[in-house]
Amino acid sequence: MLLDELLNGFPRERFLQEHYLRRPFTGASAAERLQRLGTWETIDFLVEETACDVLLARQGVPYPGDRPTTAKAARELFAQGYTLALRQPDLHHPDLAQLARAFSAELHGRINLHIYCTPAGHHGFGWHCDPEEVFILQTAGRKDYLLRENTLHPAPLPESVPSGSLAAQEKTPIETHALGAGDFIYIPGGHWHMAQATEEALSISIGLMPPTLLDLLDGVRAALASSPVWRRRMPSLGRASTLDDPSKLELLRTLLSELGGELQRQLADPGYPLRFLAQTARFYLRSTGIRGNGR
């Protein structure tokens, strides 16, 4: 398994019980084949030959210009202190697509893959947190990762990620993890973090968004939406309504009771867990893989 390659002998069961979704982990990886993907050769190809999204930032400030379209232009910006973040390169590179699919299948989640190139003595992005569980493989150079637990807005959802400015109000201690080429770090979803390159550094970041309990509810909602019973409109509840306020409230209580009963029935369906696993697995795998290799 890919996860076993990253853990390099550390027991997978222990990692899943003691670290996954809980606390950071660092170690020396055995995934040499992945290191060969995080190189300037891969970056040059993605910049010049594909429409891969490239985000640039220097000391937390985004680059105001256009995306570089040549390796020369990208490296000139890198020499000026800009970090290059190549976002979702798995949509444009077959080996990275295979990496994304494998990781999604092993841990069951949607993948958000990045490649980072950071100049020595710089950081691209300030303190922030990600909703995903983040696995970072350092493929070249050295980086210091600063981490602190998020107690102010833990377990954020993709649509409600807090601003990095909130990290300044955090009181939890800061941990520093130094990574060299071949090392990897796991950062639990929601943990505040930032990284400083002590020398020119390249890394592959695998963000994995597992399903949440709200996704179980969304699955039931999709089932209810297939029935006209639950798509029917409510009667007028505005000022023109013939119902007085107590009658409106009583109507809503009745509808909520009916809906609650149906939700309970759907969630208690013994076949729903298997359908949920199959549907989410298909969705995660469809979201990875090459969708286009040209501009």
Image (cartoon, helix red, strand yellow):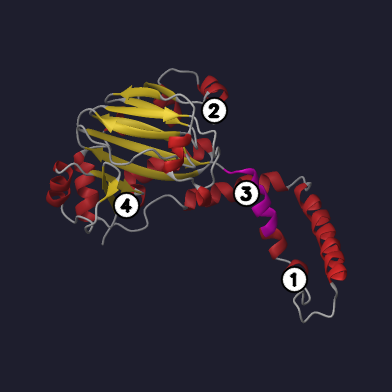
**Disc number at residue 92?**
4
State the separation of the CA atoms marked 2 and 4: 32 Å
Q: Main secondary structure of the magenta part?
A: helix
Q: Give the mark nearest the N terminus, 3 or 1.
A: 3
Residue at numbered disc 2: 22
Secondary structure beneath label 3? helix
Secondary structure beneath label 2? loop
Q: Give the mark nearest the N terminus, 1 or 2.
A: 2
Q: Give the mark nearest the N terminus, 2 or 4.
A: 2
**Disc number at residue 48?**
none
Q: Compare residues 112 and 24 and report the one nearer the observer.
A: 24
Q: Are marks 1 and 2 in contact (CB under 8 Å)?
A: no
Residue in view at x 60 percent, y 43 percent: 212
Amino acid type, callout 3: Asp
Query: Is residue 1 highlighted in magenta?
Result: no
Q: Give the mark nearest the N terminus, 1 or 4.
A: 4
Q: Give the mark nearest the N terminus, 2 or 3.
A: 2
State the separation of the CA atoms marked 2 and 3: 20 Å
Q: Which range of residues does the magenta coloring cover?
A: 211-221
Residue at numbered disc 1: 228
